[in-house]
Amino acid sequence: MHRKSLVVFSIVAILFLSTIGATFALEYLPGVTKGDVFTYSSVGYFSSNDPNAICPSNVLDQNNTEWIRVRITNVTGGAVYDEITAHYKNNTEVTRPGYANWTAGSMVNFMMLAANLSANDKITPDGAATINRTVLRSYPSGERETSILDYTQVYGNQTLHQIDYFDKITGVPVEYHDESVLANQYNTTTVFDLKLTSSSVWTVIIPEFSSFLILPAIMIPTLFAAILLKRKNRTKQT
């Protein structure tokens, strides 16, 4: 089951690659380097008023995923290679390779933008989808500019809505929200959410034990001074 639905990245990549059109105005260059690592949490949602509806295996798979790691294995010219690993709650893992060369117009199992795309820039040289806007997002390491991809596609009775956030400098996805609504006799909704939890490039979340590391550095000199003062007072009293 895991191999059939490895990671939301594969699902999102299908939506991502389905927006094909034509122009090569921009220079599409990688914003990541070999060795960069990005880790994500994921969750799937399913709802339907169909009494016979069954939750899809890929939604169950997402909810059994403990974390997803993307490791950049090589960057050469305009091409980027990575490994996407899904680590499941039963302690098993599945890894598959990804590849992108925006200038050559090729992409396989890959969901990352070229660096420094701004509002109205196409996400791929020959694509139809464009960056809607950029906003500043706050992280412990400071503010970073984020590019937002927000679009809707309709295929008959099915509506796909995708709103994704990418770090502008690196092109790395920060958050995904991909929603599919099938409206026929019944209404069925499937949602996949993905969120970046840690990065080797910049601080995404505050480390769990950071307060315990910082606090003693502040408290030790104060505690030491208090002990000395107490001993001094005792000496005076004696």
Image (cartoon, rainbow, N blue to C red):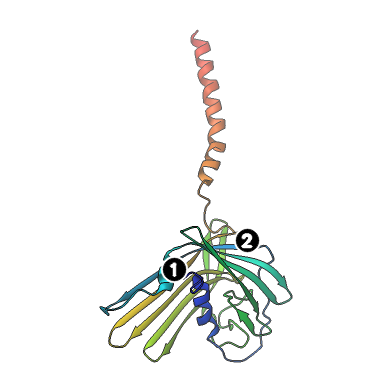
Dot 1: few (<14), some (14–19), or many (≥20) neighbours within 10 Å?
Answer: many
Above or below 237: residue 176: below
Q: Quadrant of residue 61?
A: bottom left
Between 182 and 203, the one lying in front of the other is 182
Which residue position is annotated with label 1? 61
Q: Is residue 148 visible?
A: no
Q: Residue furthest front?
A: 1
CA–CA distance in space, label 2 to label 1: 28 Å
Estimate the x, y position of residue 59 in percent, counting from the top left: 41, 71
48 to the left or right of 20: left
Q: Are marks 2 and 1 in contact (CB under 8 Å)?
A: no
Q: Residue furthest right?
A: 77
Above or below 74: residue 181: below
Above or below 24: residue 95: above
Which of the two discs, 2 and 1, labels the residue nearer the N terminus?
1
Q: Determine whether the residue tagged by mark 2 lies in a helix, strand or loop.
A: loop
**Which label lies toward us, 2 or 1?**
1
Which residue position is annotated with label 2? 201
Estimate the x, y position of residue 159 in percent, counting from the top left: 40, 85
Above or below 13: residue 141: above
Residue at 65 percent across and 67 percent down: it is 72
Residue at 63 percent across and 90 percent down: it is 23
Q: Amino acid at mark 2?
A: Val
